Image: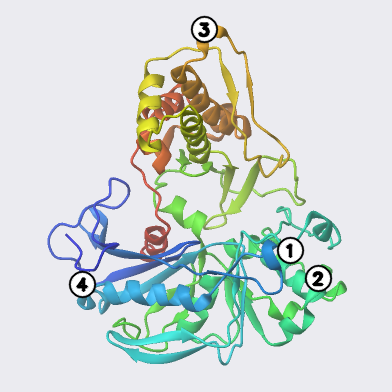
Amino acid sequence: MVGVGPPGCGGRADSGPLTAMAGSPEPSCVLGIDLGTTSVKVALVTGTERGLALAQSCSRETQAYTDSLEAGPQGMEQNVQRIIRALNECLAALPQQQLQRVTHIGITGQMHGVVFWKSDKGCKWTECGTGPAFEPQDVSHLVTWQDGRCSPTFLSSLPLPQSDVSLATGFGCATIYWYLKKSPDFLKAYDAAGTIQDYVVAMLCDLKKPLMSVQNAASWGYFSSRSKSWNTDILKKSGFPVHLLPEVGDSGSIAGRTTRAWHGIPKGVKVGIALGDFQCSVYSCLTERTDAVLNISTSAQLTISMPPGFQPPETPDPSSAVTYFPYFNGDYLAVAASLNGGNVLATFVGMVAQWTGELGLQVQESAIYTRIIQAALAQNHSKLSVHPTIFGERHIPEQLGSVTSIAASELSLGHVTRALCRGIIQNLCSMLPVQRLTDTGVRRILGSGSALARNEVLRQEVESAFPFPVVYGKDVDAAVGAAMVMFHKK
């Protein structure tokens, strides 16, 4: 089925858990919303005899980044009005007859960040061409997960959390601490706080007290996933405004119902508690507990499901390369999240382009990429070793890249490109070793991400590194994942 919306909107056939639409959709639909770092995406999912199917989707760039008056250049903030405008544009582009059949709404978005609002004046409802819609009112900027205002020195001055997650800049509680110490008057203007996805849920359901999932609460810091509670005693002792902390509910539960019609979506539709975008992305493609998800786009992640009953450590290990994310039904994901993925290859291509330019030649980077991949495909064996951590890693931020075992006979672009691709995969395997995957019961690798899709050399190195079958085309989609969670709750 082809979509009827403007560019960025339309139907899509998936080779993953979703099937292509065949004929007319079922009477009911589930809407998935992903409020991402740079764009908003919505997806309408319906049920067919073959399973779930994506009926329509639409995405919009938010262009929401704005200057931070309080934090200066270290701050990373977004204009909430622009984010909601992009959301409204996406919904307005979807077919009204399908929106009218929506029974559940699943919402996800960028984790860690924090936005503040007044619980009784968080938005105003207005009429637009497709029905009622809300616009933010008395809402702060969104301080995103990329925010850098909390220096290592500042973080070390804060109380030690009772959590399995190490506190970092960009985490909601760390940002609130920063305001408490640097600009306390700012906090006095608001009585509610949450992630951007928590804000949308609160507006749709008219929640006077924000409700946050375990997934998003864990991403804020000062939260125990084991007890599903905030470290309120620790926070109160340091004067933290605990009244701003949302109530916490189970991931996948219902937060409430829409109190008004919304772009043709009926009043009274069930709205799920807002979820983490990482968990929803994994949910969109992970069909078996014995699967591992390998995603290589700008960065790279290798994810496995932990056995039932697993509990993360009670205290964080800052030197650990693996982080445990709360998933669904009390389960956890073990994640090796590398900062070095397709961005390393892009940097290498840029370097080659710069070198050729310095030699008086002008070659497009796209042409360079194609040629170096072709050259690498001809070089299956090489002793050249590239450790590609040029962007560091969260558990070793000071780490740099290196090249070793250099032989005069292995300095061609093909040799270097092959070694670089191998290094990206080996770096992930050093963070989450193959033996651990085997011990956990992994039987298959699901490969996804733009860098993996366009690079046959990377795929070859994946197949060489892992002693499991590798299945490609399992693209991750947080909006679809959020809809799938709600569909399975129907």
**Residue 288: x and y, percent?**
42, 43
Query: Which is closer to the viewer, label 1 or label 3?
Result: 3
SS under mark 4: loop
- Name which residue type carries label 1: Tyr
- Report the residue marked by disc 1: 222
Name which residue lies at 18% across and 66% down: 25
Label at residue 27: 4
**Quarter of the figure with the C terminus:** bottom left
SS under mark 1: loop
**Residue 286: x and y, percent?**
42, 47
- Report the residue marked by disc 2: 235
Query: Which is closer to the viewer, label 4 or label 1?
Result: 1
Q: Are marks 2 and 1 in contact (CB under 8 Å)?
A: yes
- Distance of mark 3 from mark 4, alpha carbons? 65 Å
* Mark 1 crowd level (few <14, some 14–19, many ≥20, 10 Å Cα): many
- Distance of mark 3 from mark 2, alpha carbons? 60 Å
* Mark 3 crowd level (few <14, some 14–19, many ≥20, 10 Å Cα): few
Q: Earlier in the sequence, mark 4 or mark 1?
A: 4
